[in-house]
Amino acid sequence: MPDVKVGKVTHYYDKIGVAIVELTDGELKVGDEIKISKGDTEFTQTVSSMQIEHQPIEKAKKGDVIGLKVDQPVKENAEVYLVK
């Protein structure tokens, strides 16, 4: 089954390793495996921590803008996929 695009990175805070992700499709839960891709940069990771307005959440849905702890630096407009 192909990976499903769920959103894109709108900002990245390099000092704390957090990407701001706008969810455009589907939902995302803590524990899901995601792929972040832009140009020649691509990696997968498990969602370990998400926040909305500095409050921890377990699940985010289409239309939410979340803070997502990432394992590697990411670029703005990188696409976020849910790995199936």
Image (cartoon, grey):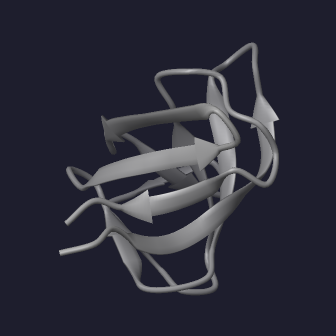
Residue 8 higher or lower than 27, as above or below: above
Quadrant in which the C terminus appears = bottom left
x and y percentages locating residue 52 in the rendered image: 60, 60
Q: Which sits in the foreground, 62 or 8?
A: 8
Residue 11 image point, x, y percent = 82, 45
Looking at the image, residue 10 lies above or below residue 62:
above
**Quadrant where the N terminus is found in the figure:** bottom left
Q: Residue furthest front?
A: 40
**Residue in the foreground of this view, choosing between 1 and 50:** 1
Classify 1 as above or below 12: below
Taking the spot 28% from the left edge, 72% from the top edge, the residue there is 2
Residue at 67% x, 19% y: name it: 16
The quarter of the displayed image where residue 22 is located:
bottom right
Q: Residue at x 52, y 85 (%)?
A: 25
Q: Residue at x 27, y 59 (%)?
A: 83
Tell me which corner region of the image, top left, top right, bottom left or bottom right, holds residue 8: bottom right
Question: Residue 53's spot in the image, x, y percent?
Answer: 68, 57
Q: Residue furthest top?
A: 15
Task: Tell whether 20 sits left or right of 7.
Answer: right
Q: Is residue 49 above or below residue 31?
A: above
